Amino acid sequence: MTYLVDHFLKPGAAAQGHPGFEHFTFDHVLNGTIEAVGEEPGDAWRLVVRDNTVTTVEPDLGEPDWMRKLPADRRR
């Protein structure tokens, strides 16, 4: 994600001005969260993007949001 932001998306990205990128706008500001899971059990992480800055954090593996909204007698 950091590579994509730095090379293609943010203002002043590395590809700006290079042949083949004339139609890119290089004006994006990314914000969001990506939940990622690897191949091994327990291999999970969260990428958090705020104003084009990417950080990696451990995911919250507690109850999912949808389950917390259920009445207590309907939860596991």
Image (cartoon, rainbow, N blue to C red):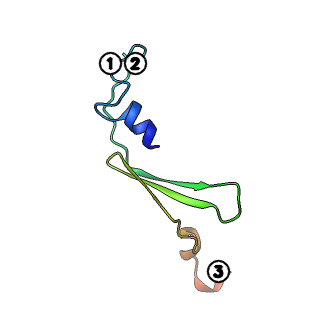
Q: How many marks?
A: 3
Does 23 sit above or below residue 61? above
Give the image quarter of residue 17: top left
Q: Amino acid at mark 3?
A: Arg
Nearer to us in this view, 31 or 58: 58
Q: Position of residue 40 (x, y in %)?
A: 71, 59
- Going by the numbered disc 2, the residue's amino acid type is Phe
Q: What residue is disc 1 on?
A: 17
Q: CA distance from mark 2 to mark 1?
A: 7 Å
Q: Is residue 74 left or right of residue 69?
A: right
Q: Secondary structure at mark 3?
A: loop
Mark positioned earlier in the residue sequence (3 or 2) = 2
Label 3: how many residues lie within 10 Å, few (<14), some (14-19) or many (20+)? few
Return the residue at label 2. Answer: 21
Instruction: Estimate the x, y position of residue 54 in percent, counting from the top left.
Output: 40, 50
User: Left or right of 41: which side holds 44?
Assistant: left
Residue type beneath disc 1: Gly
- Which residue is at the front of the view, 38 or 33? 38
- For mark 1, does the 10 Å Cα neighbourhood hold few (<14), some (14 to 19), or many (20 or more) residues? few
Tell me: 71 left or right of 23.
Answer: right
Q: Are marks 2 and 1 in contact (CB under 8 Å)?
A: yes
Instruction: Tell me the CA gap for discs 3 and 1.
Output: 55 Å
Q: Secondary structure at mark 1?
A: loop
